[in-house]
Amino acid sequence: MKQITYEQLDALIEKAQQSLKYALNQRKLVILDVDCTLPRLTIPENFTDPKCPAVVLDLGHFTLQSDTTVRENTCVFSDQN
């Protein structure tokens, strides 16, 4: 039973790799530009006392930009088999 499961898993992995290779070969250029200010969380020591000490967690800032330079013959995915 385990052997059948491993064979099915191997077949699924192989199909996923083939699908990924196909998708990468057919890929389109996607440009991402994400800029987020994350929230500040205030955690009071005592929820019933409005003048109690509190911890303030500033979760910061997140920025993501895609690399839009075109690279020829770049290997994005490699099969290690």
Image (spheres, helix red, strand yellow):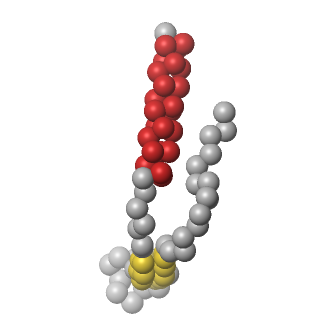
Identify the residue at image location x=47%, y=51%. Answer: 25
Number of numbered discs on residues: 0
Residue 53, placed above or below residue 70: below
Relative depth, front residue between 13 and 42: 13
Q: Residue drawn 44% across and 41% down?
A: 19
Asked if residue 70 can be seen in this view, the reply is yes
The part of the image, by quadrant, that contains residue 78 is top right
The residue sitting at the top extreme is: 1
Determine the residue located farthest toward the right in the rendered image: 80
Residue placed furthest toward the bottom: 51
The front one of 29 and 17 is: 29
> In the drawing, does residue 72 fall left or right of residue 21?
right
Q: Position of residue 62 (x, y in %)?
A: 48, 78
Q: Position of residue 66 (x, y in %)?
A: 49, 73
Quadrant location of residue 43?
bottom left
Residue toward you, 38 or 19: 19
Residue 73 point in image, percent of width and height: 61, 58
Task: Left or right? Give the position of 7 relative to 31.
Answer: right
What is the x, y in percent for residue 11? 48, 25
**Of residues 42 and 28, which is closer to you in this image?**
28
Residue under the image location 35 percent in, 83 percent down: 49
**Can you see residue 38?**
no
Q: Is residue 27 above or below residue 17?
A: below
**Which image quarter is the C terminus in?**
top right
> Which residue is rendered at x = 43% and y = 49% of the image?
23
The answer to whether 7 is drawn above or below residue 55 in the figure is above
